[in-house]
Amino acid sequence: MRKQSLPEPFEKLVQEAKELNQLLSDEARARQVAPTPPITELPIRPITITSNDIIMTLADLMQDLTQPGGVRVQAANSVAEIFLLKARTIRDLNNFYGWTTDELKRYSETGETPERLRPFLAFGEGAAINGSASLRTDKNARS
């Protein structure tokens, strides 16, 4: 039986496929010969980013009006978390989470609880309300 030859463009494709297959097997062989070094031998990169870098990046995103609204809101929420501006319980409020800078300053000067927090706190009037109450479910804990 006589071997039938392929048209020239197909022969080029077959030859290129053989060359590619050879290259791939050469790369696989090289990986087997030179494995990656153990983790203990890999250099450890120093951490060069600081918490200030993170806060400033978030602040830049938050104030950049060219960014989509969702990005700006997410950045603002992240900054609020960092600065403890999200009180989740009465205990958080007792520990001054969620207080603004102006409220903290006024409280330190006068001892006066901010008006918006008075329904939840009993500062200046005795002990604080039950510290484990949630702001979401126990808003009327003082009945």
Image: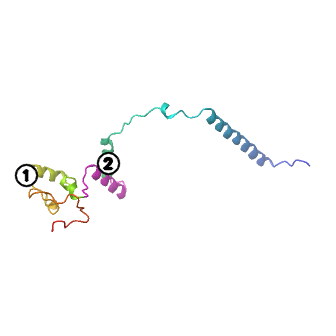
Q: Position of residue 129 (x, y in %)?
A: 16, 60
Residue ranking furthest to the right: 1
Q: Position of residue 93 (x, y in %)?
A: 20, 56
Q: Report whether 42 appears left or right of 7.
A: left
Q: Quadrant of residue 117?
A: bottom left
Residue 125, above or below 22 = below
Residue in the picture at 32% in, 48% down: 60
Crowding at dot 2, Cα within 10 Å, few <14 / some 14-19 / many 20+, comes out as: some
Is disc 2 placed on a helix, strand or loop?
helix
Q: Position of residue 5 (x, y in %)?
A: 84, 48
Q: CA distance from mark 2 to mark 1?
A: 34 Å
Residue range in magenta is: 64-88
* In this rendering, the label closer to the viewer, 2 or 1: 1
Please state, as top left, top right, bottom left or bottom right, where the C terminus lies in the image: bottom left
Residue 89: in magenta span: no
Mark 2 and mark 1 lie on one chain; the one further toward the N terminus is 2
- Determine which residue is flagged by label 2: 60
Which residue is more in the foreground, 75 or 112?
112
- Determine which residue is flagged by label 1: 110
Q: Position of residue 16 (x, y in %)?
A: 72, 43
Residue in the picture at 18% in, 54% down: 94
**Amino acid under disc 1:** Thr
Residue in the picture at 48% in, 32% down: 40
Is disc 1 placed on a helix, strand or loop?
helix
Residue in the picture at 75% in, 43% down: 15
Crowding at dot 1, Cα within 10 Å, few <14 / some 14-19 / many 20+, comes out as: few
